Amino acid sequence: MSKFFNKQNFNAAKEFVSAVKNKLNKKDSTISSVKTNVPKTKLDKTNSNLNIAKQKAKASEAKLKQTVFEIKNNKDITFKSKKGKSESNTESYKRIQKDNSKVFKKMFDKAGSNK
């Protein structure tokens, strides 16, 4: 036998190949699915509602802290109040078209006045 092919080197190579195989066959540690949380009893449903309310309270508290910080430091407010009806897709399309037509009109007027 050659000095490169002995039992110790063969076992080391075998372990290396099996380790590589295991790495390739192992699934990634990313989340592939999440179990659904369907409450079966009234208590489960109440617990679920409580957890949702807790999370909403945490979010509201974080927004409030951010707003207070921005007011103290004279910065733009990130979370502005949303009073009134929000703009629909058709309304925003019409607004954008109106703005674009103004810009084009100015461009054509400028180009026509240069000649």
Image (cartoon, grey):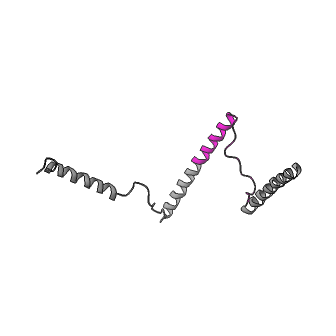
- Residue 51 relative to residue 82: left or right: left
Of residue 61 and residue 87, the one placed in the foreground of this image is 87
Counting the numbered discs, the total is 0
Instruction: Give whichever of 29, 1 is nearer the camera.
Output: 1
- Residue 89 percent location from the top left of the image: 72, 61
Residue 97 sits in which quadrant?
Answer: bottom right
Q: Position of residue 22 (x, y in %)?
A: 30, 56
Q: Residue furthest bottom?
A: 40
Considering only vertical position in the picture, is 68 above or below 56?
Answer: above
**Residue 69 image offset from top left, x and y in percent:** 64, 37
The residue at the point 80 percent across, 53 percent down is: 103
- Tell me if residue 75 is in the magenta stretch: yes
| Magenta stretch bounds | 58-87
Quadrant position of residue 73? top right
The residue positioned 15% from the left and 50% from the top of the image is 5
Q: Position of residue 61 (x, y in %)?
A: 60, 44
Say which of 36 and 77 sits in front: 77
